[in-house]
Amino acid sequence: MWQAFWALLGAAATVAACYAAGALMVDWAKAPLTKPERFPLSFVLGASLLHLIVFAMMALKIAYRPLVVAMLAVPIVSAVWKGAWRLRGDAVEPLSRVLRIFYGAIFTAFTIYYFFHAWAPESSPDGASYHLGLVARYLRVHGFEKIVTNMYAGLSAGVEMLYVPAFVIGKHSAAALVHYAFLVALATAMFAYGRRFGKPWVGAAGALLVYASPVVGLDGSTAYNDCGVAAIAFSVFYFLQLWDEVREPRLLIPIGLLAGYCYAAKYTAFVMTIYAIGFVAWRSRKMRSLLVVAGCAAAMIVPWAAKDWIYMQNPVAPFFDKIFRNPNRRVVTEQKYNDYLSTMGVENKWTLPLEVTIRGEKTGGLLGPIFLLAPIALLALRFREGRRLLLPGLLLFAPYFANVGTRFLIPCLPFFSLAMAMAISYPPALAAVLLFHAVASWPPIIPRYASKYSWRLDRILWQQAIRKIPQDRYLRQNLGGYGVARMIEDTVPKGVPVLAVNGLPDSYTTHEILVGFQSAYNDDLVDILNSGWDESRQPTRRMIFKFPAKSARRFRVLQTGVGAPLEEFKAHELRFFSNGAELQRDPAWRLRAWPNPWDVQMAFDNSPATRWRSWETASPGMYIDTDFGKYESVDEVRLDTSFDYANLRLQVEAMDPSGRWVKIASDPETKTIAPPVVIRKWATRELHARGIDYIVMQDTDWGADDMIDDPESWGFEVVAKGYGARIYKVVVP
Amino acid sequence: MAVLVSSCQSMPEPYAPPVQRQPFEEGRPHRMMRVVNTTDGDWIAHVVQDIPLSEPGPWKWTGQKPTVKVMTRTNQGLRYTIDFVLPEVTFKATGPVTITFLVNDHALESVRYTAFGDYHYEKAVPPEWVEPMKETLVAASIDKIWVAPADGAKLGFILTRIGLTQ
């Protein structure tokens, strides 16, 4: 029960602090808000401010509980003291009784589901893993730390910064409730927007189209951030309309802050920063106004870019690693990840409308069938307000095809929903549409038409929310991987990292879980692990280049072919021979490689379980270069590698005295060689050398059966088993 | 801008060769083991027939022909393995029994047991009986079953592990 209380308190305090900070700024900026607009717009604006303060505390490593609580108290006390706390504003025309009842009934019905879901133990896949896993990790060290083993640490996390104070007080559920507050703010702001331009039914319909949408309700009641992004993006738009009405220069500051906060919340929402700058440029044609907006936006953006630049050597980590080359993330891994996100198993893009509105399985959730009518939003072009809504909506929709998950449509949904409502306009028709949407989106109805495995709410979790059903029991039964995370917590010595092939809900363990695809380091670890059991990754191919003895200081193996997509250049060992005797590797040698210079030693360590990989699709010009530091005579070069690539063309080159590379051999003789009998122990030893002494394998992971069969041959001991997984300890390094 | 920023990146200096790894002095080859152990969390997923899923505890009473399915990556060097108990209570009623050990319905051997007690049986499996990466049925068939007077349950023997090893 106490968990439930602290969760509510943590969320309430955070939301109150955001509202208070925003209300203070709204008053200072002389924003001409109506009473219904005051809470949602102040809350979102305050969130942008508070996020920056939390960022600063994290950067300074002073995120201690008393300071965090004090940070929340300051704006609240200030707002109360200055009178900004009160919900006040210009009067608006009262709502009709019918609309009040209609809106109230639908809103309340869905709220019962959403509120208890947010309050219940956090069981969403991403919320329980990286969104809150990173928050929990930062809080353990009271601030940011350099994390290069988890690509998600590179994402801007403007909404998650608000989860920090909530989490400090009320843990996971408090964070989810904060996100839910963003959803409520979004719906409230949309409704208020309709009232502002004299069409309350349009506002109500737009708000409910979004609020009742299944994926919105589920996402908004977990510790994700998409509804937060939508609320921020819509607030940018809203403040721009207010500014355009009154041209109060001070309003440009909240506009700039919110526009920058879009980027801080999610990279793809950066389009709203551009939109805000463009809108102000178009309407004001004053450089000063532009500079104010751009400067305020930069105040929100630069800290995140700088953090990534300092920690990850890539200001937009974990993307564009081919431009911002760094040792922390692999180009191929990013490419595979992006390829997956851009399809999510939906090969025929023409089926996406059905997938995201009705089926909801492959793309994770559904918007609801009513959104098949989304094209009618174009009819709103006949109104000025409609034209203004559609442009930011289209901008936010533009990046969608890079990630076709249904929830990535949430940021543009408010704009299209309002435009759809505006296109219909006629209240009885809007009521009919809303009734259909509410019924179709009602959780018990969804299974009648959606995919059996669609991501959706299924029941009211009131017993779980108040912890009448204990949190631990609920999570063990409902969150895949939770039991494994707790098993790790109970079994693995404190502070020791654990290697995993697939992700786990990190936020429920204090251990660092090194997940295969999440960083270059993890990629290497999993490649080593897999080399133990996967013959296609083992050094079974020997390429032998023989040529008349050549004396040179530098030799290299150059790749000249064009690889198939994702086909890499790989080398387990590169050895040089003279008269049949290997040149012993000397500390004076200097090794270089391109395009992955960081791992070149893996081709010169005498281990069959490690290999240098280009980690990019092979292209001409890739090489491994050895500088002997003196002239050496070489007549044979051997490259031990694997058979998992075919389209590469390799040649050996020597550097002549003038510094030019001269080809001396190509078309190598290829032999099949046997890997060592104890290849698994080689792999284990390499993992141990990299600080990995615990490995968690879920029984369905690739290679898991090999370890289950014979852990001893790996040098493993099973230290825990359960929940469809095993934890292995390295005993023979 | 991106080009400008990326041009400021620092690439690492050339590396010296690392410490050379030494080969292991001894070691044995990996042994595959596809044994369904009734204490495993996922044993139910392997059951094909005649092993009641609701039976509590690690000792499972079987029907006449308990059968499990397992999958192997190879068909080389496989051995049938089973641990079972012929309980005194049934043995007194049935007398000596013959159990036939089967792989994909090929009879590996039939063994006559003339006393109750704990038994382990193991024997090499001809490679042609098993297709790699396809499910293999591993079974043991008892010739006489005991019918429990209380509830009429038809019981064969008590099983603790069955499967293929290498």
Image (tube, rainbow, N blue to C red):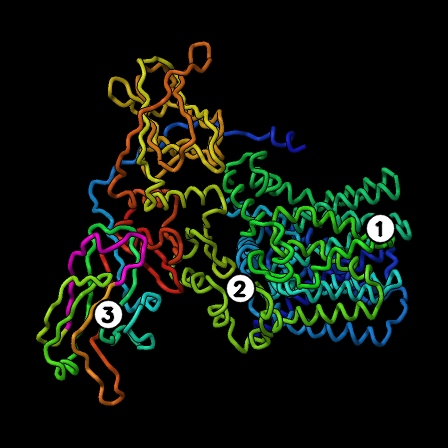
Pinpoint residue A357: horizontal percent, then vertical percent. 65, 60
* Mark nearer the N terminus (2 vs 1): 1
Q: Which residue is mark 1?
A: A251
Q: Which residue is mark 3?
A: B160
> Is label 2 in a helix, a strand or a loop?
loop
Q: Which residue is mark 2?
A: A453
> Is label 1 in a helix, a strand or a loop?
helix
Q: Amino acid at mark 1?
A: Leu
Q: Amino acid at mark 2?
A: Tyr
- Identify the subunit bearing mark 2: A
- Magenta stretch bounds: B118-137
Q: Residues within 10 Å of mark 3 (few under 14, many from 20)?
A: some
- Left or right: residue A266 versus residue A187 is left
Taking the magenta stretch, the answer to whether it contains residue B134 is: yes
- Label 2 or label 1, whichever lies nearer to me, is 2
Q: Are marks 1 and 3 on the same chain?
A: no
Q: Is residue A229 visible?
A: yes
Depth order, front residue of A24/A386: A386
Pinpoint residue B108: horizontal percent, then vertical percent. 16, 61
- Identify the subunit bearing mark 1: A
For residue A298, which quarter of the picture?
Answer: top right
- Left or right: residue A62 versus residue B59 is right
Inter-mark Cα distance, 1 to 3: 75 Å
- Label 1 or label 3, whichever lies nearer to me, is 3
